[in-house]
Image: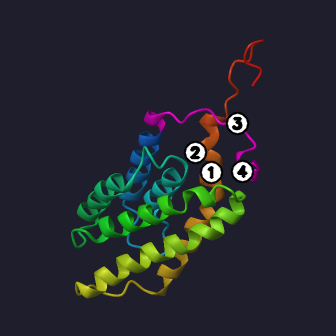
Amino acid sequence: MIMPRASRELLLPANPAFIWLTLVLALAANLMPLGRHPALPDLLALTLVFWNVHQPLRVGVGAAFVFGLFMDVHDAALLGQHALAYTLLSFFAITIHRRLLWFSVPSQALQVLPLFAAAHAVSLIVRMFAGGMFPGWELVFAPLVEALLWPLASVLLLAPQRRPPDPDKNRPL
């Protein structure tokens, strides 16, 4: 069997506590009062997609829906706006997760860019149908920044799994 380039390195199993801690920290980063700038990246969406790709059995569509509701309540947005966007984002990330892991990290960033753009478009469409104002053309930059943050997220979020296990004569790996 031909091994994918990205999985030549052996990774330890992901700690569920670390996964949920990173999701809660990303939610906290989104909750910071930085003002309303449409070009700000959605760190929670980035973290959700990352864990949907790398751990789809632990972080699924249900978690994305709950985090989306948290964001809806915080932003005083139409209830379900972020929940719908995060749910669709997670569904499509889980759909492509096996194929995505065969590519290098920069190629992965290019392939998750349409996912982030679609999530922002869904959120914008729901906001506009509800009678909200158009946030401005700076909204186009948010998915680009999220895709550019993908390699950094890959390095930071996979770092605890890259620890070398204790080798001995029975376990050479």
Residue 31 at x, y percent in the picture: 35, 57
Q: Name the residue beneath numbered marker 4.
A: 6
Q: Which amino acid, by three-letter code, is at mark 1?
A: Ser
Badge 2 amino acid: Leu
Q: Is residue 165 placed above or below 155 in the rendered structure?
A: above
Residue 134 visible? The answer is yes
Cα–Cα gap, marks 3 and 2 = 15 Å
> Which residue matches tag 1?
154
Circles 1, 4 touching at the beta carbon (< 8 Å): no
Measured in 3D between alpha carbons, the distance from the residue under mark 1 to the one under mark 3, in whole angstroms, is 15 Å
Q: Quadrant of the C terminus?
A: top right
Cα distance, mark 2 to mark 1?
5 Å
The amino acid type, in three-letter code, at marker 4 is: Ala
As drawn, the label of residue 157 is: 2
Residue 153 x/y as whole percent: 59, 52
How much space separates mark 4 and mark 3, taking CA atoms?
10 Å
Q: Residue 136's quadrant in the figure?
A: bottom left
Determine if the magenta segment contains residue 81.
no
Judge whether 28 appears above or below 13 on screen: below
Classify mark 1: helix, strand or loop: helix
Circles 3 and 2, Cβ within 8 Å, touching? The answer is no
Between 1 and 11, the residue placed more toward the observer is: 1
Which stretch is magenta? Answer: 1-18
Foreground of the two, 29 or 19: 19
Q: CA distance from mark 2 to mark 4?
A: 15 Å
Lower sequence index among marks 1 and 4: 4
Question: Magenta stretch: dominant SS?
Answer: loop
Residue type pointed to by label 3: Leu
Asked whether the beta carbons under mark 2 and mark 1 sit within 8 Å of each other, the answer is: yes
Residue for badge 3: 10
